[in-house]
Amino acid sequence: MALIANLLILLVALLHLYFLVLEMFLWDKPKGMKAFGLTPQKAAETKVLAANQGLYNGFLAAGLLWGLYQGDAGSDFKVFFLLCVVAAGVYGAMTVSRKILYIQALPAAVALALLVLSLN
């Protein structure tokens, strides 16, 4: 169970690194605009905000990777950062797009559930 939880945590971290790249570097490029349904004008207007959001996604990924690196001693990091991802995903689903619930919050919630089960 712990191995599956850690693999899912790794997947969540990698997703957030991908979000970082999309939001910080590709926001106003064809791939970024397609991913977020942006027009060139909207992408240009929101580029700085997106980069800031991407940086936060990088922090989430870093926290999860740090928890994984720590092994069993990193359980508190994993729980904390997974809770942060779930909270961000739920908020994003409520304010931006329901799709965020499935792309961001659900994988983190499943990883969190498996992690908690593996700790008991």
Image (spheres, rainbow, N blue to C red):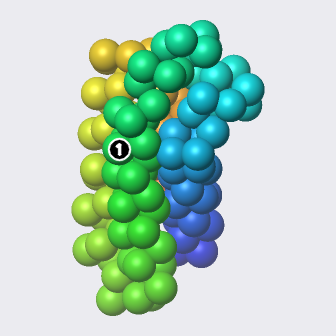
Q: Is residue 8 visible?
A: no
For the point 29% across and 27% down, the residue is 91
Observer-nearest of 60 and 29: 29
Observer-nearest of 110 and 53: 53
- For this view, does 34 lie left or right of residue 53? right
Q: Residue furthest right?
A: 30
For the point 33% across and 89% down, the residue is 73
Observer-nearest of 54 and 111: 54
Vertical relation: 110 (above or below) 75: above
**Residue 81's x, y, as percent?**
32, 60
- For this view, does 24 lie left or right of residue 82? right
- The three-letter code of the residue at mark 1 reads Asn
For the point 47% across and 73% down, the residue is 65
Where's the C terminus, which quadrant? bottom left
For the point 33% across and 76% down, the residue is 75
Where's the N terminus, which quadrant? bottom right
Q: Is residue 25 visible?
A: yes
**Residue 6's x, y, as percent?**
54, 70
Image-quadrant location for residue 3: bottom right
**Residue 68's x, y, as percent?**
47, 78
Image-quadrant location for residue 90: top left
Image-quadrant location for residue 11: bottom right
Observer-nearest of 116 and 82: 82
Residue neighbourhood size for the residue with mark 1, other residues' Cα within 10 Å, grouped as few (<14), some (14–19), many (≥20): some
Vertical relation: 68 (above or below) 79: below
Vertical relation: 78 (above or below) 106: below
- For this view, does 25 lie left or right of residue 65? right
In the picture of the structure, the residue carrying the numbered disc 1 is 52
In terms of secondary structure, where does tag 1 sit?
Answer: helix
